[in-house]
Image (cartoon, rainbow, N blue to C red):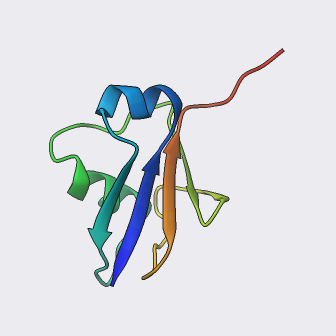
Amino acid sequence: MSITVRYFASLKENLGRGEDEIDYAEGLTVKIAWDTLHQGRPLPSNVLAAVNMEYARLDTAVKDGDELAFFPPVTGG
């Protein structure tokens, strides 16, 4: 039972990897997943999250088999 965690753009570059796996646990949220994977490294304030390609808040529950993504805001012209 696990969740795939993906990182995009500058966040991927800063972390030095594009993907992690985390074991599912009851009560897992977007924020708890970040904290578990990046102990001591705060979530950057401008980073957005998505669960299964839908924008998510930090308190959104993450379930077994979900895909969690973290990415900086997208800008363009």
In the figure, residue 7 lies in which quadrant?
A: top left
- Please name the residue shown 40% across and 43% down the image: 18
Instruction: Count up the numbered dots.
Output: 0
Seen in the picture, residue 75 relative to 72 is either above or below; the reply is: above
- Please name the residue shown 31% across and 64% down the image: 21
In the figure, residue 72 lies in which quadrant?
A: top right
Q: Residue 64's x, y, as percent?
A: 42, 82
In the figure, residue 26 lies in which quadrant?
A: bottom left
Q: Residue 29's x, y, as percent?
A: 40, 67
- Please name the residue shown 53% across and 39% down the image: 71
Q: Residue furthest top?
A: 77
58 vs 33, nearest the viewer: 33
Q: Describe residue 47's horizontal placement relative to residue 44 as left or right.
A: right
40 vs 69, nearest the viewer: 69
13 vs 54, nearest the viewer: 13
Q: Residue furthest right?
A: 77
Q: Describe residue 39's horizontal placement relative to residue 20 as left or right.
A: left
Q: Residue 32's x, y, as percent?
A: 31, 61
The quarter of the rendered structure image containing the N terminus is bottom left
- Please name the residue shown 61% across and 67% down the image: 52
The quarter of the rendered structure image containing the C terminus is top right
67 vs 46, nearest the viewer: 67
